[in-house]
Image (cartoon, grey):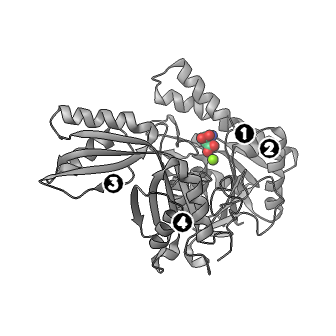
Amino acid sequence: MPTLVMKFGGTSVANLDRIARAAKRVAVEVANGYDVIVIVSAMSGKTNELVGWVSETSPLYDAHEYDAIVSSGENVTAGLMALRLQEMDIPARSWQGWQVPVLTTDAHASARIEEIPTKNITAKFGEGMKVAVVAGFQGVSAAGRITTLGRGGSDTTAVAFAAAFGAERCDIYTDVDGVYTTDPRITSKARKLDKISFEEMLELASLGAKVLQTRSVELAMRYKVRLRVLSSFEEPSDSAGTLVCDEEEIMESNVVAGVAYSRDEAKMTLISVADRPGIAAAIFGPLSDAGVNVDMIVQNISEEGRTDMTFSCPKDQVLRAEKAMNDAKTSGAINFHDLVADEGVAKVSVVGIGMRSHTGVAAKMFKVLSAEGINIKVITTSEIKISVLIDRKYMELAVQALHDAFELDKAG
Ligand code: ASP
Ligand code: MG
């Protein structure tokens, strides 16, 4: 029997009615002849509540217990989904991560899946089980402790199961009906994409499009798992949702696939640091040790052996970054004149695999921003992406103007 993985996010299992509705979707695929592996999230809001209980009880909590508690939301929805399917006369049972087992590293709260042995579930399919309902987001370490995969981790569970079982496809049911050219809340011209390549999706996910956990896209790209993102609130159809797939499967597409943004960025500049071998390591080593996620980096021209170093990071990490830099200065590892933080910036990016073969995308982007009178503070590029830092107050305008200029409202 071909295998299909169907993942239901928190809003799709938010209450018993929604679970019943999701179960009907599962029944359709069972009738289509699939052995189905259903991956469920916790009911929406549940994980936040559990995290809150943990912090309230123990501010510096033990990560083992955090995982034991926070993983429990998925156990409830897995059991309820299995029961609902049984009520529909579909042979189904629930599986917690350790029962499969989903073997992970012991990095509690952000564990990585190492292996999913397929033996146990395959044996049950052989005995007539039609649906395995698996609790997403959780696994078990070599030490036998329950682990979780980081927030949003049930997407990664779903892709990992699809890879392990060689599933035909991995359908991710969520509360939006697919991946859009940009956030529809920013422009009503945002258009749902029928297909998007793994690489573009990876950029969009890491740039702040929240439909899929970034790691799940990485995994899908590595194992070539065809992912479909679709809404559990719409009527099923073959063209529903967005297919995330290999670029070979996409015949025609726009040069730019989407415009992404990330609102809460900060730009920090170390003024007058010594321009000598090892200076970048001396700055970014301590930042990384302090858990600062540095994104863009610019080293300015040097004058008389001194230079300015600019980097960006999430706004809520500014204090940590300042502390790391001041500590490094005190210890003598680095020396700078001043550290200036601009906490009022946002990042706007255009993404598209078409940029590999089309020149002029960057020039056009800069022209569009200049026509709107928007000043660019920092620029970075990769093969398929151009990102700029701008004043946060112009973020919406920039997204709208770029979306218009690259004609993303029209299909490629
Ligand atoms: N329930 C977990 C969370 O809210 C995992 C998930 O839903 O993907 O992060
Ligand atoms: Mg999610």
Above or below residue 157? Residue 380 is: below
Residue 312 or residue 373, whichever sits in front: 373
Instruction: Name which residue type carries label 3.
Output: Ile
Instruction: Give neighbour class at mark 1: few <14, some 14-19, many 20+ (Cα, 10 Å).
Output: many
C-alpha span from label 2 to label 4 = 32 Å
Q: Which numbered circle lies on residue 200? A: 4
Side (left or right) of 99 relative to 199: right
Side (left or right) of 44 relative to 52: right
C-alpha span from label 2 to label 3 = 46 Å
- Which one is in front in this view, the residue at disc 4 or the one at disc 3? 3
CB-based contact (under 8 Å), mark 1 and mark 2: yes
C-alpha span from label 1 to label 2 = 8 Å
Instruction: Name which residue type carries label 2.
Output: Ile
Q: Which numbered circle lies on residue 19? A: 2
Q: Residue furthest left?
A: 304
CB-based contact (under 8 Å), mark 2 and mark 4: no
Query: According to the image, label 3 marks what residue?
Result: 297
Query: According to the image, label 1 marks what residue?
Result: 77
SS at circle 4: helix
Above or below residue 36? Residue 96 is: above
